[in-house]
Image (cartoon, rainbow, N blue to C red):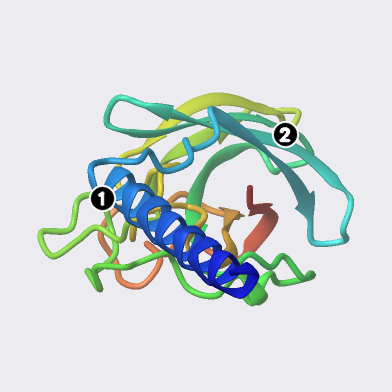
Amino acid sequence: MHSTHRAFRTMHLAALAAMLTLACSAAMAKGAKAPKPPKSVVVKMQNAQGKDAGTATLSSATGGVKIKLNLHGLTAGEHGLHVHQAAKCEGPDFKSAGPHFNPDTKKHGLQNAEGPHAGDVPNFKADIKGNAKATLIAPNVTLADGPHSVFTGGGTALVVHAKADDGKTDPSGNSGDRIACGVVAK
C-alpha cells in the first residue's frame, strides 16, 4: 500500500508540474511583457587621448532617440555625429567603433535618396571655446529591443567627427576624423 501511495503521489506531482508549465507558456504567449527599455542612458564621451570630453544623454522621443549633448574640448564649428555599430572606443582614431550602425544596409546620409544609415544623426555646433550643448533627434534608432536598437549586439558607440557631415556622401558624409567617442550600453 505504501508504494502504491508513493507512485500515486509522484504521478500527481508530475501532472501538476505539467499543468503549471502549460499555464505559464499560455500566459507568455498571450502577451507577457518584455522588459521595458531604459528611460535614458548617459554616454561618457572621451577624446582621442582618453580624456573626458563630456556626456551625451540618450532618451526615447517621438520620432527616434533624443540625444542631449554636453561636450567640451572640441574645435569650434560644426561637427558630424553618428551611431557606430561596435561598442568600442579605442583611441586615438576610434576605428574600433566600426562603421555606422546600418542594419538596413542603406547608403549614408539623411539627405541621400538611398539612405540613411540608422546611425546617421544631424550635425551640431561647438562654440568658440569648443563647448557644445545641443539636443538632436536620431530618427532611425531606438532604445527598445529590435534591429534598430542602440543596444543591439551588446551596444553601439556614439562618435563625434572633426567636420560637419554633408548629409549625402557615402560612407560618412566627408565628416573627417573621429575625435570623440562614447560606448552606448545598458
From the viewer's perspective, is 86 left or right of 61?
right
Mark 1 is surrounded, within 10 Å at the Cα level, by few (under 14), some (14 to 19) or many (20 or more) other residues, namely few
Question: Please, is residue 7 above or below residue 147 in the view?
Answer: below
Q: Residue at x 42, y 64 (%)?
A: 101
Q: Is residue 57 above or below residue 27?
A: above
Q: Position of residue 79 (x, y in %)?
A: 53, 45
Residue at the extreme front = 1
Q: How far apart are the alpha carbons under marks 1 and 2?
A: 52 Å
Between label 1 and label 2, give the one nearer the viewer. 1
* Place of residue 123 in the rendered image (x, y in percent of width and height, measured from the top left): 44, 41
The residue that appears at 36% across and 72% down in the rendered structure is 171
In-image side of 136 versus 148 (left or right): right
Q: Earlier in the sequence, mark 1 or mark 2?
A: 1
Image height of 125 relative to 102, above or below: above
Residue for badge 1: 29
Q: Nearer the viewer, residue 76 or 156?
A: 156
Does the image show residue 158?
Answer: yes
**Which picture quadrant has residue 55?**
top right
Give the residue type at disc 1.
Ala
Secondary structure state at the residue bearing disc 1: helix
- Name the quarter where the N terminus is drawn: bottom right
Q: Which residue is mark 2?
A: 130
Q: Residue drawn 48% across and 54% down?
A: 82
Q: Residue at x 68, y 55 (%)?
A: 181
Name the residue nearer the viewer: 35 or 177.
35
Question: Does residue 175 show up?
Answer: no
Q: Are marks 1 and 2 in contact (CB under 8 Å)?
A: no
Asked which secondary structure carries label 2, the reply is loop
Residue type at numbered disc 2: Gly
**Which disc is residue 102 wearing?**
none
